[in-house]
Amino acid sequence: MTAKAYSQVNVLGDYLEKPSGFGGWMKTIFQTQEVKLQLALPTRCFLRLKMFCEDLQEYNNSNNNLELSFDELVELLLEDIVEFYAKTNNPLQLNKHFKNLEKLPLAVSSFTQRKEKFIVRLDRKLIFKLEMLLADIAEFEEDHSHSVEKILTLCLFNFLAEIFRGNGEAMRKSIIKRIK
């Protein structure tokens, strides 16, 4: 039986269906630590998130040079989900949270905006953990529509919404504290 794919890269599926013998061994040896995912956001949202990363570097109050790429921002948001799940081990709570994110009004974007497709490089292990979470949710709600890409997009929208609500400074300080 083939496992459901929860992302374009299907890290969980690769692990579950790992071929045996020399081919399986070679695949394991040459697996990269990073995977590439394609996400799509309205162009304005994508540009605003990139600008947040640049602003964080440019207007850092300390003398330390901080760098935050867009990929690193996405990975920080992914780490938040994975760490929360590791602490709570409650897939139903996160499923409810994901559903609530889907219901938030998208004040940060318009459905008519052109979408920008872009590639993000993320840690394979983090993708695996989020796919495991989505598989755990499927134990209770088999037909859920969550995917890694969809969850990351919702998190990016939520992040932007927090900035637009006036919480940008707090978000900036939190990120600086984490990456120092």
Image (cartoon, helix red, strand yellow):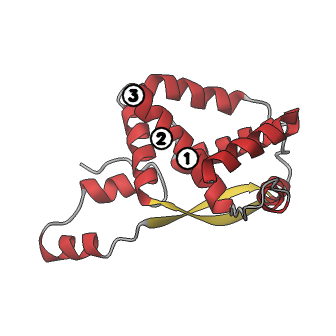
- Tell whether 46 sits left or right of 131: right
Residue 13 position by quadrant:
bottom left
Could you tell me residue 142's position as x and y percent?
A: 40, 31
Q: Residues within 10 Å of mark 3 (few under 14, many from 20)?
A: some
Nearest the eye: 79 or 114: 79
Could you tell me residue 96's position as x and y percent?
A: 55, 24
Task: Report the disc number at residue 168.
Answer: none
Give the quarter of the figure containing the C terminus.
Answer: bottom right
Q: Residues within 10 Å of mark 2 (few under 14, many from 20)?
A: many
Distance of label 1 from label 3 (alpha carbons): 16 Å
Say if mark 2 contacts mark 1, CB within 8 Å: yes
Report which residue position mark 1 lands on.
78
Distance of label 2 from label 3 (alpha carbons): 10 Å
- Three-letter amino acid code at the position of disc 2: Val
Residue drawn at the location 82% of the way across and 41% of the way down = 168
Element type at mark 2: helix
Report which residue position mark 3 lands on.
89
Nearest the eye: 58 or 30: 58
Q: Is residue 58 above or below residue 83?
A: below
Nearest the eye: 82 or 95: 82
Element type at mark 3: loop
Q: Residues within 10 Å of mark 1 (few under 14, many from 20)?
A: many
Q: Residue furthest front?
A: 63
Residue drawn at the location 69% of the way across and 41% of the way down = 174
Q: Is residue 92 above or below residue 36?
A: above
Could you tell me residue 155's position as x and y percent?
A: 65, 42
Residue 10 position by quadrant:
bottom left
Q: Earlier in the sequence, mark 2 or mark 3?
A: 2
Report which residue position mark 2 lands on.
82
Distance of label 2 from label 1 (alpha carbons): 6 Å
- Tell whether 23 sits left or right of 163: left
